[in-house]
Image (cartoon, rainbow, N blue to C red):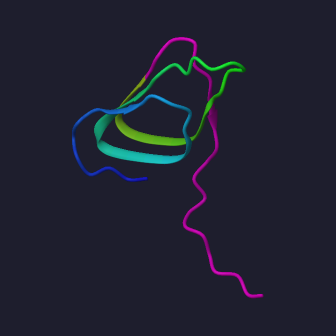
Amino acid sequence: MGVLGANTIPVEGPFTGTLMALNAQITLATTHLTPPVNHTGAFYAKNIQVDPDNTIVHFPFSGPPTPTST
């Protein structure tokens, strides 16, 4: 997902994917779920704030999908 604006981007639930907000701050909120659920993916931003008691699982961006033949 890409964000072009400069406003803070709150991520208040579990996130899986790649988030790019090069002119904004991303705030990764604590997920109060049982069992705990992580934020998973790659995060690119001007600033990144990670709230307490969070686990971030890095999954590198591998580029856009490529077509496959069947």
State the image coordinates of residue 45 (x, y, percent, origin top left): 37, 39
**Position above or below: 24 against 5:** above
Q: Residue furthest left?
A: 6
The residue under the point 46% across, 22% down is 29
The residue under the point 51% across, 11% down is 52
Q: Residue furthest front?
A: 34
State the image coordinates of residue 19 (x, y, percent, origin top left): 45, 46
**Position above or below: 17 against 62:** above
Pick the residue in front: 1 or 49.
1
State the image coordinates of residue 46 (x, y, percent, origin top left): 32, 36
Image-based side of 24 in relation to 64, left or right:
left
**Position above or below: 67 against 27:** below
Q: Residue furthest right?
A: 70
- Residue 55, by quadrant, is top right
Image-based side of 45 in relation to 23, left or right:
right
The residue under the point 63% across, 29% down is 38
The verdict on residue 65 being magenta is yes
The verdict on residue 57 being magenta is yes
- Provide the major secondary structure of the magenta segment: loop
- Residue 41, by quadrant, is top right
Residue numbers of the magenta segment:
50-70
The residue under the point 78% across, 88% down is 70
Pick the residue in front: 61 or 39.
39
**Position above or below: 52 against 44:** above
- Residue 56, by quadrant, is top right
